[in-house]
Image: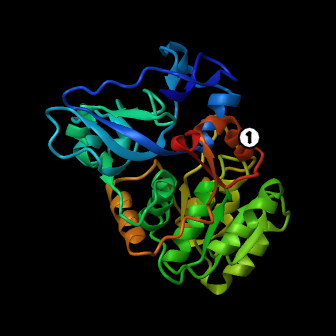
Amino acid sequence: MKAVAKTGYGPFRLEYMEVPKPVCGDNDIILKVKAAGICGSDMPLLYGPDEAKYKGYMYPMVIGHEFAGEVCEVGRNVADWTVGDRVVSDNTGYVCGRCPACETGNFLLCPERKGIGGDMDGGMAEYVRIPGVVLQRDPASIRRIPDNMPFEHAAVMDPICNAYKAIVQEAKVLPGDNVVIYGNGPLGLFSVLVARLINAARIIVIGTRKSALMRNPICEKLGATDILMADDPELVKKVKKIGGEDGIAAVINCASRSANILPQAVEMLRPGGTFVMVGYTRTAVSYAEDPADLMGHKGITFIGHMGYDHTSWRNVLALYREGRVDMDPIVSHKLPLSKWREGFEQFSNREAAKVVLMPEMDG
């Protein structure tokens, strides 16, 4: 089968190539991939730097952790899935099933978790295997998608579920609250969508000039009430003015671990507000002034965010089924799988919001 695979450790070692089709074990299922999203976290796989864990991998390794498709093979011991089921995966490939995280259903926090497309062959391919061990220990890691959901939308459930968990489950933003969203990449855009969905009052997006031309219009279409630039020296002052006497209830960082974001957020937030750390970088950050004292004085809650949970997936799928979620403005580009490099370049150059690869477009 054709796939986008990493052929070795280091940058620029991705290829569109022929790899063996996965074999279905007695407890596995095989999906015929219909759509696979390109994520910002995929960029280092092409451009570098590689994570140290990749040094010990057996190459080639198929990438892609955002994908949806149709069940085309089922193992003889599998009872819950049938050929033809339209499904989406949350990309969990293995969990131990016995740690405190697994016991409480927080499978993404399992210390032994392995991700499909990160630790084992993924979904930027014609076919992908869902291991039987995860179907047994975390059966809800695979879900049927609504009849009205196209595969290109199902493939990007990962980032919208991230946004839902950050805003609704963690920050607990209420209708009428004011919220600030750092970043206008896919996570930021989906956060705008979710904030509008729950009727946040002022939805303030802080973006960069590099992304403004392509993504600011999408922010506006999704419901952003205000768009400010990250390099604005008056940024905090402007945000506080927009928040008015009600203040800012939550800051959702979908950008990075930039040195200025946390101190700015702590200053922006009203007493008792919440900061959710969604975005991240691989570099250490030091602060000119430690924001901890001000956080304590204002009673600010800092939440370290990791992905989503089954509540996020269930509720977002339900909202989509009821026609409450429109992903069309965000899924800006659909390309054949063979055009994967073009998709990476469009995303990296801020020429696209969300790129989805469609294997069947290759014919």
Residue 192 sits in quarter? bottom right
Residue ranking furthest to the front: 363
Residue appearing at x 50%, y 22% in the figure = 61
Q: Is residue 168 left or right of residue 347?
A: left
Relative depth, front residue between 153 and 309:
153
Relative depth, front residue between 339 and 80:
339
Residue 26 sits in quarter? top left
Instruction: Please provide percent x and percent y for residue 269.
Output: 62, 69
Query: If the image is split into quadrants, where does the C terminus sit?
Result: top right
Relative depth, front residue between 19 and 123:
19
Instruction: Please provide percent x and percent y for residue 89.
Output: 38, 45
Residue at mark 1 = 345
Instruction: Please provide percent x and percent y for residue 349.
Output: 78, 45
Q: How many marks?
A: 1
What amino acid does circle 1 point to? Answer: Glu
Residue appearing at x 49%, y 33% in the figure = 125
Instruction: Please provide percent x and percent y for residue 56.
Output: 50, 13
Residue appearing at x 42%, y 26% in the figure = 120
Q: Secondary structure at mark 1?
A: helix
Name the image colouring.
Answer: rainbow
Residue 115 visible in image: no
Relative depth, front residue between 296 and 132:
132
Residue ranking furthest to the right: 233
Determine crowd level at label 1: few under 14, some 14-19, many 20+ residues with C-alpha closer than 10 A: few
Determine whether 220 is above or below 83 in the image. Answer: below
Q: Is residue 352 left or right of residue 103?
A: right
Residue 354 visible in image: yes
